[in-house]
Amino acid sequence: MNSSIGADLLKKISSNRARVGVIGLGYVGLPLAIAFAKAGLPVTGFDIDNDKVDAINAGKSYIKHLPAAQIREITDRKNCSATSDFTRLHAADLVVICVPTPLTEHLEPDLQYIKSTVALVAEAVRRGQLIVLESTTYPGTTREVILPALLEKRPDLKVGKDFFLAFSPEREDPGNPEHSLANTPKVIGGLTKDCAEIAGALYQRVTPNLVFASSPEVAEATKLLENIFRGVNIALVNELKIVFDKMGIDVWEVIAAARTKPFGFTPFYPGPGLGGHCIPIDPFYLTWKAREYDCATRFIELSGEINRAMPEYVVGRLAGALNKVKKSVGGSKILILGFAYKKDVDDDRESPSWKLLDLLKKQDAKVDYHDPFIPKLKKTRSYDFTLSSSPCTAASVAKYDAVIIATAHSGVDYELVGKNAKLIIDTRNAMAGVKGVKATVVKA
Ligand SMILES: NC(=O)c1ccc[n+]([C@@H]2O[C@H](COP(=O)([O-])OP(=O)(O)OC[C@H]3O[C@@H](n4cnc5c(N)ncnc54)[C@H](O)[C@@H]3O)[C@@H](O)[C@H]2O)c1
């Protein structure tokens, strides 16, 4: 460690005197704040959403897979709390930024949350602080956006000597019981070696496995590669689903057989489209940045095109199946089963169910949804539907002309659905192996 200020910060971290400030207490920031608090570091959580701040300070959870007992890991400890008072950032030695990085309407990076957060951090930046960006973004954000904003307010400070800056992508997979922060390697890219070392000392407190990248750009690009890899492979199986179906071959059976190969194959599964805050969005951060270098990103664009076409494909399969019983989509009663973007989570961001609902409504279908984790649909940037989750009982399911399984939550009684529905459009292979099915099942 070249910097004496950095050496002091390392000592503060190892003796639990360094305060962590986590900005953005959502799916990523809240579990991270809990992990740091559990590790014995004093933690202040920051969010602009007062409801979240109040919930945490009252020991309540607002994320399904994080029980309130875990929130109390923060609130029961001395020196840990949440706030929307950003002047308290000055007291934080280690600032971790976990705010959203969505896309604009034109599929371009929307850095407004990062920029407004950095403006607040810049007001408080001082000697002896480490700032880490965790939000997924394009290569160059930490160096080209964060660093100049901090230096503009404090031109007297030198990065790597007076204060420290790094990027460390979040690999949180909400609701995954096998992989959590504690057993998932954490990639770190510092602006300087000292920046990386201090960020490593922080993350070592919550995860044993650190991977040092040579720069923030490498770490930023690593996260994008991981998510582009998923997006492209999901597009591939979505395309194969359509081709194989025309040939009378079930893609799910093909994937099950292919995955028995012990090397060189990773299974990905088709579905009604991409959802969540990562896979549908992150690839376009690279596409946008690549334009600056006159580079085309054809793979990424093509996979986005295929994945975005999936809700239309599902509605087409529904229309075809209804046709066979002399019905049209218009006027039919449809139940969308599962609204979250993936099973067993309460997150409906970018869920393809929104698009399905929109397409069906535009064709004058009468649409309800059932999701045990999403009692009501809240207005989003793109959609505004006033709907509450409908029951999924034998009598209610029997009323619908078709049930579209958009998300296969574990708690749903698929035997009941299979026995009582007339027609099931199954986008998740949820009906495979279900006994006593009387409904017509169409995979889509
Ligand atoms: N959700 C995931 O599974 C996941 C996984 C890996 C990476 N990421 C990335 O992590 C980042 C955060 O995602 P998330 O899912 O936690 O989002 P989220 O929407 O659940 O949480 C973000 C939080 O930031 C708060 N916020 C917004 N602007 C703020 C500001 N200026 N100051 C303080 N707080 C502010 C919001 O109120 C919200 O509570 C994104 O870049 C995302 O791509 C998410």
Image (spheres, helix red, strand yellow):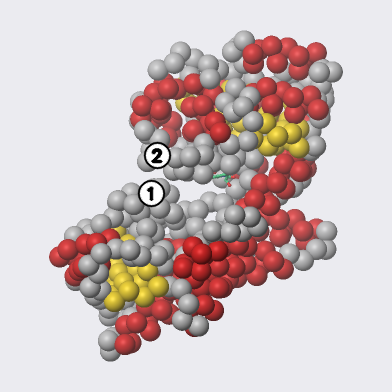
Task: Quadrant for the C terminus, please.
Answer: bottom left
Q: For mark 1, what is the residue?
A: 344
For the question of whether residue 120 can be seen, the reply is no
Q: Quadrant of residue 182?
A: top right
Q: Quadrant of residue 193?
A: top right
**Residue 378, position as x, y percentages in the image:** 37, 53
Q: Is residue 442 left or right of residue 244?
A: left
| Residue 115 higher or lower than 73, as above or below | below
Residue at position x 59%, y 68% from top? Answer: 236
Quote the CA–CA distance across marks 2 and 1: 9 Å
Q: For mark 2, what is the residue?
A: 65
Task: Quadrant for the N terminus, please.
Answer: top right
Q: Which one is nearer the viewer's eye here, 434 or 18?
A: 434
Q: Which one is nearer the viewer's eye here, 230 or 68?
A: 230
Looking at the rendered structure, the kind of residue marked 1 is Asp
Residue at position x 43%, y 31% from top? Answer: 53
| Residue 154 higher or lower than 223, as above or below | above
Circle 1: element type: loop
Q: Quadrant of ligand 1?
A: top right
Pointers 2 and 1 in contact (C-beta within 8 Å):
yes
